[in-house]
Image (cartoon, rainbow, N blue to C red):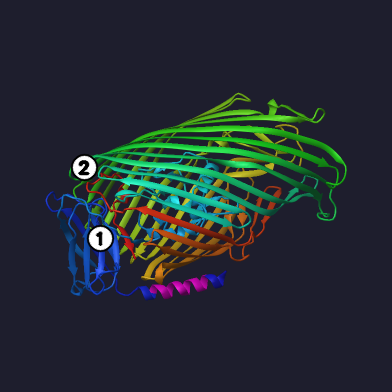
Amino acid sequence: MKKFFLLYTILLLFIINGAMAQRYSIKGKIIDEITKENLMFVNCVLYKDSDSINMYKGASADTSGNFVLKGIRKNNFNLELSFVGYEKHNLKIGIEKFKDEKVIDLGEVEMKSTGKLEGVEITAKIERIQVDEDKLTMNIDEQLAASVSSAFDLLKRVPGVFIDKDDKLTLNGKSGVMFQYNGRDLKLDYTSIVDMLKGMTPDQVEKFEVMTNPGVKYDAEGTAGIINIKIKKNQNYGVNGSIWGQTSYQTALQYYGSGRLSYVDDNWTTSIGFSPMRWASKSTNKEERYTSTHEGDTILFRTEKDDDWVWENNNFNLNANYLIDSNRTIGLSLYYTKGGNPLKENTVPYQISSYPNYFSKIDSSYINSSSYLGDRSNFGLGLDYVRKLDTLDSKISYDLSYSHSENDGNLANLNEYFLGDINTILSRREGYKRNTLSSSDDLSARVDYFKPIKKTMRFEAGAKTNFTFNDKDFYSRLLDTTSNTYLNDEMQSNHFKYYENINSLYASFSNTFKKKFNVRLGLRAEQTNTKGHQYAIDSINTRNYFDIFPNLSLNYKFKDDNQLSLSYSYRISRPWSGSLDPFISKYSEYSYSTGNPYIKPQYSHSISLSHSFKYMLFTNASYSFTQDDINWLEGPIDSNLFEHNPLALISIPTNFGSNHNLSFRISFNKEFFDWFRFSSSFGSTYMKILSSANKAQINRENWSYNGNISTDFTLPKKWNISVYYYFYSSSMYGLSSSSSSQDISLSVSKKFFNDKFGLTLSVSDLFDINENYSETRYLNTLSKSWGNYQGPRFSFSLRYSFGKYYKNKQVQKPQVENFDTRAGESKQ
């Protein structure tokens, strides 16, 4: 571990020292020669005078016509600007322009309209990791997409994101992440989001945007921040598309595929995609649970089981935008996913023994035979309208979105209890069949107003209302061992409905002083109304509360390539509906779970300091304090609830106490040569949990570390090699701890036929270097689990692209997202 960090530090210092050679930036603003209007998305391509064929740098102008080309060494260059419907414009930039000032400002550059369309084919690489004062972006290129199996696997590679073997996610060591899909909130529980991402092929994802300090324009939900999943939208003129397929094998055969078709003209931008997939996995796991009794004995529950999982899914998405005129646009976004688990059957033996004869004598045992069949679907529809109000780029936008999800799960359980080993006398049998039908509907409407004031000031304001309806019907039948039939079990049947309404207002003001110091101050108010109705016991719980969430961001530019940012935010994580249902579910004589209608939202104060240097080195330090931290605790059952086995445990969510989180991260991203790109990230997190006075005094603290290194080599004849390594030290998640994990993956790709056809071979989990161990301690119980190494994973993928590619639009589309108004730099 220490050797890894030492080698990482030496390597990073060596690379930074080599990259510190004089680098410059070229920037400018592109306008129409006659109308003087800004031209967005103009292709800006830089060639060396000595090489007019191979592109040296490339960028695309942003929605205000601004562009920036970064990381340029002294030389004689020719800058070529191209835009559909405009004449190509060339600018000579001599070596004499590269002086002490590191930024060459070309000012306003005028382009002349031709009145006709011309095809322009430009292929440029994008930076895989981009960091600014608002967010971290991980762009998904073709090579990265081909090295993993699903969008969920891509998410694991985002710097700061850690996902353990049970799919639990933390962002910079903190739980409570809000997910978005193309900028719209995903009002789903985390399990449904995981299922959705596992059902999406990596080829569908354009980028992940991570905002740990979102502005007040965004919902305050998510104490750790927001992860926005951006789906690809084709901006190329004409009809074009792509077909992608992958098959892989680790412990079972898996397949993934996607097809995408796009049409773009002067008014329409449309994209439609479909992706089927089948994910399968086999593993062996061992579990042990130690429980201390009042008599002073320690009881051991242990089992070793084989898990065989299959997940099938089909995903459909549609994006369409129509340009009404140069001031108005309307858009539609739609997605639908349907999948589930084919019938899965497992038989798991459990052995129970007591100290000191843990492994030599078995006191009792039971066999759990189960089967599960599940079906899930998600549907989302969004409509938006944007209107440009004046020549200063003032805009107003309206957004209406609706989503619906359904889950139909069928579980059958048969527990057979024995007085000794499973080969001895059968004591009794207990069985049940349960059908869970759950649905969720979410409807939201919002309006946003954006107003530039002079050149340095901006004002934003907006309002939003959101309605969520959850309905969970839990139907249970109990085995009658006399007749060997299943009868209705009203005591274990349950119906729970949950309603939530959030109304919000926000306002934000920003100003830049002397072109260097920017201040953004925002305030968001949210009023929340909830109602939970448990029909089995006719229990109704309502709650109404009002919160104000301030947000502050300070940014200072020493130079364009040297910036320092300081931010503060106050955020909330509300409990999801399933954690509020007070119904008690029984899995065996020793295992129960229930919700808690009295848990409160958790609130978090966060402060972050970040620095960007030379567009290649990014550092960040952050601290957060979370009050009323929500954790799921497993402890003894209250004897007043019902008659139960004294060894039984029940899992229940509760506001455990407070959480202190201190995080550091350093990232480096650089293309040194046309054929070599290097990126790395290293982070450390300190977490301290303090239990509240009415909870058992279990105060915990932990330091954890993580790092990753990625190298990409572009070889002759369009061969590419990519090597990726990551490391996570042991970490803490609530009251649980997990062991360290690491992986090395390798991929080789090749393009053919003018880059229209490509293939990739990849292998991951190359070595058995992971412990796969986790444990949880609370009160009188210690739970341990181990997972085995599944072997290397081999993948083979093919891609075919077709159609005529044209870049950009003849007429501008009004935009409203302020964080997208930066130039998108690309490099080759």
Q: Give yes or no for residue 10 being in the magenta stretch.
A: yes
Q: Where does label 1 land, which residue?
A: 44
Q: Percent from the top left, x then y, of residue 362?
A: 84, 50
In what quadrant of the picture does the C terminus appear? bottom left
Image vertical order of residue 731 relative to residue 598, above or below: below
Q: Nearer the viewer, residue 481 or 542?
A: 481
Q: Nearer the viewer, residue 459 or 680?
A: 680
Q: Is residue 596 visible?
A: yes
Image vertical order of residue 414 relative to residue 125, above or below: above
Residue at position x 28%, y 72% in the image: 73
Q: Percent from the top left, x then y, of residue 89?
A: 18, 61
Q: Secondary structure at mark 1?
A: strand
Which kind of residue does numbered mark 1 sit on? Cys
Q: Residue furthest front?
A: 753
Name the dominant secondary structure of the magenta segment. helix
Left or right: 284, with 542 as reference point: right
Q: Where does label 2 land, which residue?
A: 326
Which kind of residue does numbered mark 2 sit on? Ser
Q: In this picture, which residue range is highlighted in magenta?
A: 5-16
Residue at position x 52%, y 63% in the image: 762
Q: Give yes or no for residue 732 being in the magenta stretch.
A: no
In which quarter of the view is residue 88 placed?
bottom left
Q: Disc 1 and disc 2: Cα gap in Å? A: 23 Å
Q: Percent from the top left, x then y, of residue 710?
A: 46, 66
Image vertical order of residue 426 relative to residue 678, above or below: above
Proximity of marks 1 and 2: CB atoms separated by less than 8 Å: no
Q: Percent from the top left, x then y, of residue 608?
A: 41, 55
